[in-house]
Image: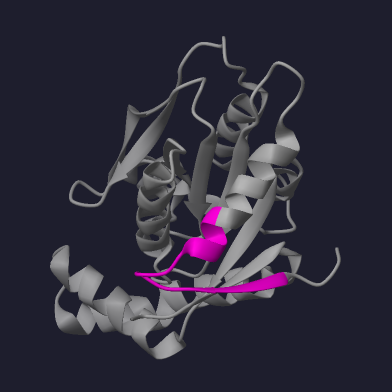
Amino acid sequence: MSAAVRLEAGPSDVAALVERVRVLIDRAALPGRPGRALVGIAGAPGAGKSTLTEVLSGALERAGLPTAVVGMDGYHLAQSELERLGRADRKGAPDTFDAEGYVGLVRRIRVQRPDSPMVYAPRFDRHLEEPIAGAVPVPAGVPVVLTEGNYLLLDAEPWHRLTGLLDECWYLEVDDGPRRERLVARHVAHGRTPDAAAAWEAGSDQRNAEVVAASSERADVVVGWRES
């Protein structure tokens, strides 16, 4: 893969990203059929992938480009299955997801046509800490689909198939200090004690962040995210 394009963005300025998506839509158009951009956004735990997709989808909607957002996190294995497999103590690692299921979802979205049925994706509920099936509709005619998650750029089976299904996959680059602070605060907000939250972030989360960072060289675009 050639060197990634670098784009700068922030909460109040995603114009360059909107234009990038618009180009992808135009490139995908065929005679008599509108184009669709299917863009992946990868990044370490706590990088702000959900924030970026929310800000970007809002900007795309205002630009007249309806957008669906689906997350890899909807394919977390259920807590009961993680416990059965002995993986509950490292929830969030690549093998704690139904990766084949997620790749299958992206493939269904890839081949979806304007006259195809609705595709439904699961959503991960952070309060329940469980996935909820059929929670996110992806209409056939929507011109933009954004999908975000940690492992979209992994060069391992079956994750490596994703880059062949996406029009582009972007890597969200942020300062490490604020990212790690956000993770600790998130864990506390969802019921862990401050000490337990810090231990989980320094252990499981950081190991996963290192795996994600090692995959960043496969990105088409690196998005440098400014916090303000």
How far from the left and from the top, in percent, is residue 82?
Answer: 40, 48
- Residue placed most toward the observer, 104 or 192: 104
- Residue placed most toward the observer, 208 or 42: 42
**Res 108 → quadrant:** top right
How far from the left and from the top, in percent, is residue 203?
Answer: 42, 79
**The C terminus is located in which quarter?**
bottom left
Judge whether residue 14 is colored magenta. yes
Drawn side of residue 4 relative to residue 35, left or right = right
In this rendering, the answer to whether 137 lies above or below 75 is above
Structure colour scheme: one colour
At horizontal 76% and vertical 43% (from top left) the residue drawn is 164
At horizontal 56% and vertical 31% (from top left) the residue drawn is 105
Question: Which residue ends up furthest to the right in the rendered image?
Answer: 2
> Magenta stretch?
5-18
- Residue placed most toward the observer, 186 or 191: 186
How far from the left and from the top, in percent, is residue 48?
Answer: 39, 67
Judge whether residue 210 is colored magenta. no
**Res 193 → quadrant:** bottom left
In this rendering, the answer to whether 47 lies above or below 33 is below
Any part of residue 42 in sight: no
